[in-house]
Amino acid sequence: MINPNLGQKAKKTLQEFVPVIDERIARYFDKELGAEFGFNARQKQMVRQALLHGKEYILRPTKRLRASFVNYGYMLGNDNVTAEVWQAAVGIELVHAALLMHDDFMDLDDARRRGPATHKFYEKKFGGQVHLGEAMAVTVGDALLCLGFELIQSTGNSNVMRQVLRGIANTAWGQGYDITLEAFGNWTEEDVIVLHQAKTAIYTYENPLCTGALMAGLPEPVYPILHDYSMDGGVAFQLQDDILGVFGDPEKTGKSADSDLKQGKCTLLVLKVLQDGTKGQITSLRKAWGNRGATREELDKAKAAIIDSGSYEYSKQLAKKFASKAAKRVSELRSLHLKAGAIDYIQGVAEYMIEREV
């Protein structure tokens, strides 16, 4: 059910969407900056700097897939997006930025979207004090999380707020599962799929899509379709993300292509080498995987092992399989007499997300 034409159309639509939502995000931060919160001049300066960093961080080049899903979830039943829907879309992006700030700290990643991670930004500001930099990443992330929730809540739809809060809570449990797998270093292909469903599928796909759909008041038969699409599309998205985390161009992705290996992330790319690779390939992988001091030569040999063992191709094909399932399932929305343009976009994303380079 993959349709390359819909994939290219979705890519173009998303690219055109980015500057529109970015302008609204910028306006939101400018409004917050204008409030000048603080009980004295020193605290006001601290808050101002945090908001300026948050604004710069969130406006770095990115896809804005989640915000677009809010809009197109709503547009399944409507031709035009309301101010409240745009507000929810901005809120979803604030929540996303908050989770990234926390994720970068937990993963000990130095960079995000071609700029410093928040904990590294504050570590430098605080003269190299690592712990205080990490503490501020948690703090600023918490603030953006609450500001995002406030925006979503102010749309006045309690079902939307319930959907978002439960989705983020379940995403947190997914993150906990990720940490647990990394701690014990023993996982299966099923674990990888479940992990991608528990994190990416819920918070990148289902949460924003259902936010828009609920705001549109779409009928009950829509939601099981969106759920199934999200579970399969989210897995495809994350399998591609794991590939980019090792083989992507840092100039395009905005993050290192070595950190996933150095960190010892439990990905399908690694698992298939350990299961199916030769003794030499497994040895090459283990010298870099989980080794934060791995040399350039060790990293390159580990990447070669992923390709030569067939692991890379296995992940690519599995991503296509999940993307095809997602596209087929979401096409069933057409029988519900919803807006064809919105269905085209959502279906097209399934194709585009496994071909992307960012």
Image (tube, rainbow, N blue to C red):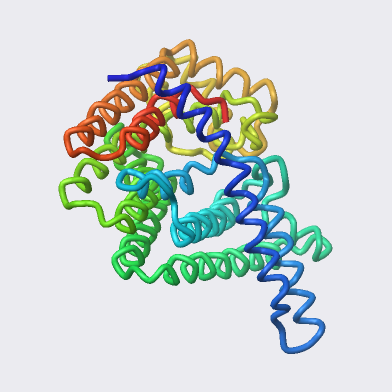
Residue at image coords 36%, 41%? 196
Q: In the rendered view, tell whether residue 223 sits above or below residue 294.
A: below
Q: Residue furthest top?
A: 308
Residue most extreme to the bottom = 39
Residue 72 coordinates in the image, percent (x, y) = 39, 43
Residue 175 vs residue 97, the one in the foreground: 97
Q: Is residue 150 above or below residue 334?
A: below
Is 204 positioned to the left or the right of 108 in the image?
left
Residue drawn where x is 17% and y is 34% of the image: 335
84 in relation to 302, above or below: below
Judging depth in this view, the residue of 130 and 69 nearest the camera is: 69
Is 271 displayed left or right of 290 in the figure? left
Residue 327 point in image, percent of width and height:
29, 28
Tell me which residue sits at (41%, 13%) in the image.
310
* Quadrant in the rendering for residue 227: top left
Residue at left offset 32%, top offset 43%: 76
Q: Position of residue 257 (x, y in %)?
A: 62, 30
In this view, the residue farthest toward the front is: 79
- Number of disc labels: 0
Between 305 and 134, the one nearer to me in the picture: 134
Image check: 349 left or right of 14? left
Quadrant where the C terminus is found in the figure: top right
Please indicate, yes or no, whether residue 184 appears anywhere in the rendered image.
no
Q: Where's the N terminus, which quadrant?
A: top left
Camera-side residue of 227 and 169: 227
Q: Where does residue 24 sit, x and y in percent of width and height?
A: 61, 55
Is residue 167 something one can see in this rendering?
yes
